[in-house]
Structure formats: C-alpha cells, structure tokens
C-alpha cells in the first residue's frame, strides 16, 4: 500500500518544521515582523491574521480567550495585538489541532495564566514524537507547558462573554484532532484547517486526516450558518456561508472526478496525469498545495491509505 504515496519533494520540505503553513518564517521574510490584521466580527469576536493559522479572539466582560496562537516566533507580537483589543487576562487557549502554526504560542501564553483546551488527540500528538510520511519529517514532543491541560473527546462548551461557545470535534478531517468552534450569539464559526479559503487544503493523512472527514466537518458547519454567519478559516480571508458552500461543492466534485478514475482501475500516477482538478487548479492550486498534491490527498483518502497511516501512527506510540 505504501506505493500509493508518491514522493513530492517540492517546497513542502519547508513545511518540515512540523507546521502546515509557516512559509513566511523562512528566508528573508524572517527579518521583518509579519503584519497583523484584525477584523472585528461581532461585539466580542475578532479574527486576527498574522503568521500561521488565523486566530479567533473573544473579548468581553469575562475576559479574553483565543482560538489558536500561530507560530512560536511571533508570540510576543501576537500578545501585543491581543492587548490592543483588551487588557484583560487571557483565560483560555483553544487549539483547533496540533500543527505548529496553530499551537506555537501555547507555552508562552499559558505561562501568563491561560489554560489550554483541545481534543484528546492534540494532547496525544503534541506529547509524543511524531513522524509524518508526507512531509518526511519527525517532530519531537512539545515542552510540558505547551500541552493542553483540559482535553475532550466529543465536545466541550465554554460559558463566557455572553454566549455558550461549543468546541466540536470533527473526526479524521484535516487531522484526527480537529475541532470547530461555534460562537452562537456572535454568529461566528472558527473552522481551523478543515477550511482553507481560496487555496487547496492540506489534508494531513499521516495525522489521521481524510477528505471524507473534511467534508463531514464542512457539512456540520453549514448546518450552523445563516446568511449573516462569518466564518474564520484556518488559512485565507474571513468567509461567508456562500463561499464555504462553494468549497464544499469543489470538494464533492473533485472527489467524484477522482473516484471515477479509480473505478476505471487507474493508479495514482495515472489519476494525477488525468488532471481531475483542472477546473480549480488556476484559482486554488498555485500558492501552496499544488494540483498533484491535492489529487494525492483525495486519491489516498478514497483508497483507504489513511487507515494504513493511522495504524502506523498507533504502532509508533
Ligand atoms: Zn494544520
């Protein structure tokens, strides 16, 4: 089954620091700090773009809590940006999954008194050595202070700042530890890396991710939306339900296109050569995840390779 993996030696090597998308940390961009852009989405919720996954911030009468905290080197800048919104204590950090561009600030911010909350598998992966086949990279365990303190299996609810915010596990989506966060009064959903807005998604099959799980997570999120809902993607600009629906439709059609080729008995190499994602490649496949990689994620999801990689991950524990 291992043959189904093809080596993709491209800039993905840059992902090697254990993150999905920390490319700006490399090279010349390292010299100047990233620009942070804050977008107010409700009376209490703000989205912050910086370096790494998008951050959600809830600030109100009960204090501050955040969803994800970007890459480690920008943590002091991230804290300064949060302080512009509120100078109240940061009480909780919710991690959408374990990748380093979403949990990089954990240790420092937890050191200020925040409690880290995440799915059980985030704790499991962050506290043990991980080998990622696709990235061909090993990630050492995180320091104890960076690990989640409270973990959950299905969902957990935070009753803060005037709303009951649910943190809901999505099984085998971008990874095996994903959560989406629903702010019902604010009418905001943070999707983590279940949703890449405007670019092909990274599906981390080696960490238990799958296309099918991503689709299930998108469908779940859509059931919680109305026309005014604002959606924070893991990467890319703030989104509307209309755009999220288009993302769902792209994933479904791409899945059907790849499945039709699998049904004809084609190998992964032959499926890539048939360009089943051609209609989206210009719009979504030019920045990070390239068309051949997108097709590989879909093919491996549909042919059950993720089952294999999950078993392998378990064996390494
Ligand atoms: Zn990720």
Image (tube, rainbow, N blue to C red):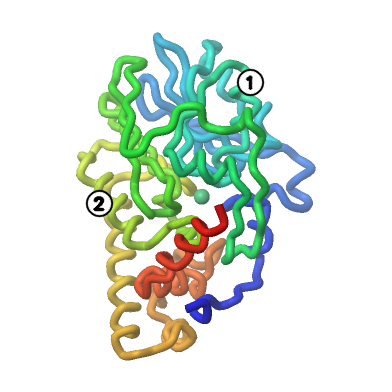
Where is residue 279? Give x, y as percent: 38, 74
Where is residue 46? Give x, y as percent: 44, 28
Q: Is mark 2 within 8 Å of ligand 1?
A: no
Q: Dot 2 surroundings within 10 Å: few (below 14), some, or many (20 or more)? A: some
Seen at 45% across and 27% down, the residue is 150
- Whole-angstrom CA distance, mark 1 to mark 2, is 36 Å
Would residue 285 appear left or right of 19 to someone viewing this image? left
Q: Eyeballing the image, is 232 above or below 14?
A: above
Kind of element beneath mark 2: helix
Where is residue 246? Give x, y as percent: 30, 58
Q: Dot 1 surroundings within 10 Å: few (below 14), some, or many (20 or more)? A: few
Q: List the residue tagged with mark 1.
A: 111
Q: List the residue tagged with mark 2.
A: 219
Quick one: 303 or 28, which is closer to the camera?
Answer: 303
Quick one: 219 or 92, which is closer to the camera?
Answer: 92
Kind of element beneath mark 1: loop
Is residue 188 among the parts visible in the rendering?
A: no
Instruction: Tell me which label, 1 or 2, sits earlier in the chain.
Output: 1
Would residue 246 appear left or right of 310 to someone viewing this image? left
Seen at 45% across and 49% down, the residue is 193
Seen at 50% across and 75% down, the residue is 292
Seen at 35% across and 33% down, the residue is 167
- Mark sitting on residue 149: none
Which one is in front in this view, the residue at disc 1 or the one at disc 2? Answer: 1
Q: Eyeballing the image, is 91 above or below 211?
A: above
Q: Eyeballing the image, is 276 above or below 238?
A: below
Q: Quadrant of residue 152?
A: top left
Where is residue 257? Give x, y as percent: 31, 78
Quick one: 172 or 222, which is closer to the camera?
Answer: 172
């Amino acid at each position: 089954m291992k043959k189904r993996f093809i080596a993709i030696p491209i800039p993905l090597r840059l992902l090697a620091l254990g993150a999905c998308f920390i490319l700006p940390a490399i090279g010349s961009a390292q010299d100047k700090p990233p620009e942070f852009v804050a977008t107010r989405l409700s009376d209490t919720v703000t989205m912050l773009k910086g370096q790494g996954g998008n951050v959600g911030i809830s600030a109100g009468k009960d204090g501050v809590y955040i969803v994800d905290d970007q890459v480690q080197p920008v943590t002091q800048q991230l804290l300064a940006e949060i302080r512009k919104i509120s100078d109240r204590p940061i009480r909780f950090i919710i991690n959408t999954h374990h990748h380093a561009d979403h949990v990089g600030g954990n240790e420092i911010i937890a050191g200020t008194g925040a409690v880290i909350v995440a799915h059980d598998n985030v704790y499991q992966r962050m506290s043990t050595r991980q080998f990622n086949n696709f990235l061909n990279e090993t990630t050492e365990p995180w320091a104890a202070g960076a690990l989640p303190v409270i973990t959950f299996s299905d969902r957990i609810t935070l009753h803060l700042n005037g709303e009951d915010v649910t943190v809901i596990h999505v099984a085998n989506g971008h990874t095996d530890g994903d959560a989406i966060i629903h702010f019902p009064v604010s009418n905001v959903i943070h999707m983590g890396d279940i949703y890449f807005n405007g670019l092909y998604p990274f599906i981390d099959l080696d960490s238990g991710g799958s296309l099918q799980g991503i689709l299930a997570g998108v469908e779940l999120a859509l059931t919680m939306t109305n026309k005014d809902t604002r959606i924070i993607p893991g990467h890319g600009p703030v989104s509307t339900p209309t755009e999220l629906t288009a993302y769902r439709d792209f994933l479904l059609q791409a899945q059907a296109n790849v499945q039709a080729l699998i049904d004809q008995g084609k190998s992964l190499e032959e499926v890539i050569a048939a360009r089943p994602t051609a209609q989206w490649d210009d719009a979504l496949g030019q920045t990070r995840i390239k068309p051949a990689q997108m097709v590989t994620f879909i093919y491996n999801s549909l042919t059950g390779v993720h089952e294999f990689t999950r078993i392998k991950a378990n064996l390494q524990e």
